[in-house]
Amino acid sequence: MVTVSRAALAASACLVVAACGVTSSPSPPPPDGVGSVAGTVVAQAGTAQSAAVAALRTRSERGARGRPRYVPGELLVALRPGVGEQQAVAIHAQAGGRVIRSIPQIGVHVVRLSAVVSPEAALSAYRASPWVRFVERNAYVYPTATPNDPLYATHQWHYPSVQLPAAWDATKGSPVIVAVVDTGVRFDHPDLAGLGVAGWDFVDHDPDATDPGCPSVDPDEPSHGTHVAGTIAALTDNGVGGAGVVWGGATAVRLMSVRVLGEDVVAGECAVGTLAAVASGIVFAADNGAKVVNLSLTADSPSLTLQSAVDYAYARGVTLVASAGNDGGPVGYPAAYPNVIAVAATACDNTRASYSNFGSSIDLAAPGGAATLNCPAASPLGWVWSASWSPSSGHG
């Protein structure tokens, strides 16, 4: 399973299927990297070896922090151009799957497998077909988080550290739409009122992209998407809450809530998403007027589906900004892709936050909050504050 870890949310926020209808079957295209490898595999039986194989399989099914990596029984399949509707149905059926959703702009089918078909068998079947461009597991995506406590501080020390007051003297932004691809946004928050444009919920598959919180697992969990939205564009100079990077309300910057992370009651997790949802959210934002897409989330493995969505948006003039990750390891995805601005997190003293992922893919570093000797957790300097909401506490 791909884990989307929480990273430098303030940092990233600061910057701000295939078509059907062909019924004939043209001659198969060249394999183009898809094919089989000749050889012999010898499996030696034995209790110790079987246990080792089982342990490896279990580890491969877990991502960072031991969380589930893959969506059970789901694959992401891209067919080659020229495949008709009936032929596509046959290809999926032969592999033991059926299409439950699609992302037609990037030619990806979300496929659910029959209960009797293993993901490994289905992957092999798809890869053996000359009509399949790529196939991969649909994986979970988790949000990037604030590093320590869910409570947010009140002192916005992070704005002077990026020379934002000086920037405000030059410009307070321009009338663009920024998509917040996250847990959803509470536009009923007094510091976000009037800033929203129509979005979409790819968790519940409806047009209401309001963050419902995490009422069953943790009603105290604050709205991650609302925090990010507040950092970007909270109403400024209005005597309420904090200020937004773009001096919210003054320059007609509007926020598009695209909900891709939600509550997973079975796993007991708040704010869990999938590659399919995130890719769909990026495509939706690009198709509906967003010029900036903020992705304060991270997957721990590369995905051709996610990269296809990133490239689709980039080709349409969209600027994509993503957090590097929050596991202290290499830069996650989509931040690691060339067409995305990757942002690492810093503490109040401009040192790298201990939790922040890092590497050669990093483009920028910006405040994410962290406790250091110079930034004590007991003071506002250890945290980044923004608009907040949870089912238990309401707006804050």
Image (cartoon, grey):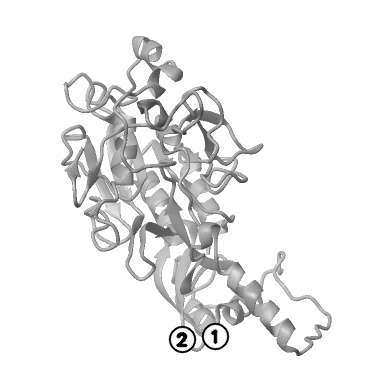
- What residue is shown with label 1? 94
Q: Secondary structure at mark 1?
A: helix
Q: Please state, as top left, top right, bottom left or bottom right, where the C terminus lies in the image.
A: top left
Does residue 145 sit above or below 305 in this rendering? above
Neighbour tally class for label 1: few under 14, some 14-19, many 20 plus, Cα within 10 Å? some
**Of residues 392 and 118, the one drawn nearer to the viewer in this rendering:** 392
What residue is pinned by disc 2? Answer: 115
1 vs 2, front mark: 2
Residue 142 at x, y percent in the picture:
44, 54
Is any atom of residue 129 visible in this view? Answer: no
Please indicate whether residue 379 sits to the left or right of residue 97 in the image.
Answer: left
Name the residue at 23% across, 41% down. Answer: 197
Q: What kind of residue is marked 2? A: Ala
* Residue 198 image position (x, y, % from top left): 23, 45
Residue found 50% across the figure and 76% down from its top: 88
Q: In this view of the protein, can residue 135 be seen by the observer? A: yes
Q: Residue at x 69, y 84 (%)?
A: 50
